[in-house]
Image (cartoon, rainbow, N blue to C red):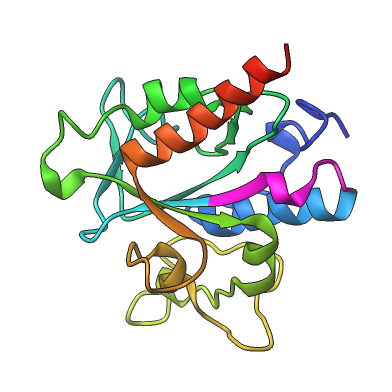
């Protein structure tokens, strides 16, 4: 199996189901844990949403030209290696896989300053080990009132824990008192993780 950077398979070889980004990222974390291709403490699932669940992202495969896609939430994988710059893995993006956080921020996230407040993004950063241990989804959010699927589900069984069959909303929530991980405003997230990677790179010289 070919790999893009030694941590994860090339994009086309990753487990992927359209519109199930949270499970796609869970599978990426699972691969890293199983294959031990990176230290899990450097790996994070990042849930992007806001109180209104209207978050614009650019450079998405489902977008058109330079227009953003408005998601209710989106999930990406973040790898913060002390020896190099932070990397983003987004299976729904047109950008490279992986992509540096700086490039992803500039081209996919852009800035909240030019957006109306209802579109401002918040990010819940969840350590990969916590995500793997606690996340559960019965995929009920993808069913209509008559029980049919909005989009076909993954072929593998739903991700569940002994404590829960469905806690996706706790991960999407931008309330810091709920769920796992740390909630950031977009500017604070970028200050924290791009500065961290820049400092690490400068220290390595």
Work out which quarter of the rendered image holds the N terminus and state it.
top right
Residue occupying the point 29% across, 45% down: 121
Residue 109 position in % (x across, y down): 36, 32
Residue at horizontal 76 percent and vertical 26 percent from the top = 4
Q: Is residue 198 magenta?
A: no
**Residue 39 in magenta stretch:** yes
Q: Is residue 133 above or below residue 195?
A: below
- The quarter of the picture where residue 187 lies is top left
For the point 62% across and 56% down, which residue is it? 127
Residue 94: in sight, yes or no? no
Magenta stretch bounds: 36-45
Left or right side of 48 for 161: right
- Residue found at the far top of this picture: 205
x, y (%) of residue 172? Answer: 40, 63
Could you tell me which residue is drawn at 46 percent across and 66 percent down? 171
Q: Quadrant of the C terminus?
A: top right
The answer to whether 108 appears left or right of 152 in the picture is left
Q: Nearer the viewer, residue 147 or 142?
A: 142
Could you say which is closer to the camera, residue 159 or residue 113? 113
* Side (left or right) of 80 relative to 52: right
Q: Percent from the top left, x then y, of residue 89?
A: 60, 36
Q: Is residue 55 above or below residue 196?
A: below
């Amino acid at each position: 199996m070919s790999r893009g950077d030694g941590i994860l398979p090339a994009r086309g070889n990753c487990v992927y189901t359209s519109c199930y980004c949270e499970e796609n990222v869970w599978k990426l974390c699972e691969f890293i844990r199983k294959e031990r291709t990176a230290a899990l403490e450097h790996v994070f699932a990042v849930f992007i949403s806001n109180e209104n669940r209207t978050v614009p992202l650019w450079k998405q495969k489902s977008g058109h030209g330079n227009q953003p896609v408005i998601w209710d939430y989106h999930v990406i994988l973040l790898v913060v290696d002390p020896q190099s710059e932070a990397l983003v893995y987004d299976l729904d993006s047109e950008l490279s896989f992986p992509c540096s956080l700086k490039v992803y921020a500039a081209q996919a996230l852009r800035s909240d300053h030019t957006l109306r407040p209802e579109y401002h993004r918040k990010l819940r950063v969840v350590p990969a080990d916590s995500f793997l241990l606690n996340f559960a989804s019965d995929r009920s959010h993808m069913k209509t009132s008559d029980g049919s699927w909005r989009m076909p589900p993954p072929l593998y069984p739903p991700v569940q824990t002994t404590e829960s069959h469905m806690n996706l909303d706790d991960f999407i929530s931008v309330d810091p008192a709920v769920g796992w991980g740390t909630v950031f405003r977009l500017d604070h997230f970028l200050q924290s993780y791009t500065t961290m990677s820049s400092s690490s790179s400068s220290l390595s010289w």
